[in-house]
Amino acid sequence: MELIISIAILAMLASLIIFAFNPERGFKRANNAERLTHVSAIGGALNFYAIEHNGAFPSGIDSQLRMLGTAQTGCDFLCSSTSTPSVCLDIDSVLTPDYLNGVPMDPETGSAEITNYAVQKLPEGIRVVSCTPALDEAIESIQ
């Protein structure tokens, strides 16, 4: 019994030491977790919108990957190996407050003008992508 308790204490100390030596990686992983939550929330909100509008998605969502935001220029990013148009797609007024409290923004680099999340309509559903994930992870959702 004492051996099990000792091993558990050592495991907890080891995890603290690993985080202490590489806190930046821990923060990046936490931001990626937040990005995944945002991607899922945007996809869910768009699907609820479509359910209440006879299957139609908000205007501007089509087969082209489009950056979300209010900016009229500067939205042309390489997002998930696909270029987005220079004008952002503003869906905030369509989704707020009925489906979201506000369109989420990337935790590190996002703003209302350029959220760093992009959407695309596919035959199998709505694709939502985080354009600036950390640690070379692909963060996207198809709902």
Image (spheres, rainbow, N blue to C red):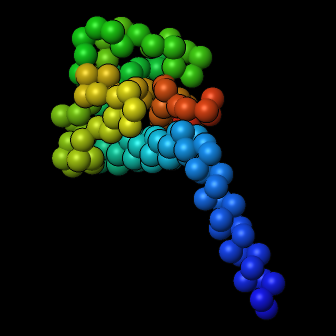
Question: What percent of the width, then of the height, locates residue 43?
Answer: 43, 42
Residue at 25% x, 16% y is: 71
| Nearest the eye: 123 or 95 | 95
Residue at 45% x, 45% y is: 34
Snapshot quadrant of residue 139? top right
Question: Is residue 50 among what the camera can see?
Answer: no
Question: What percent of the width, then of the height, locates residue 45?
Answer: 35, 45
Question: Is residue 86 among what the camera can see?
Answer: yes
| Nearest the eye: 43 or 71 | 71
Residue at 75% x, 79% y is: 6
Question: What percent of the width, then of the height, locates residue 56?
Answer: 34, 35
Measured along the vertical axis of the image, is residue 35 above or below residue 131?
Answer: below
Left or right? Give the position of 41 relative to 98: right
Q: Look at the image and tell me in which quarter the N terminus lies.
A: bottom right
| Nearest the eye: 104 or 8 | 8
Snapshot quadrant of residue 60? top left
| Nearest the eye: 106 or 6 | 6
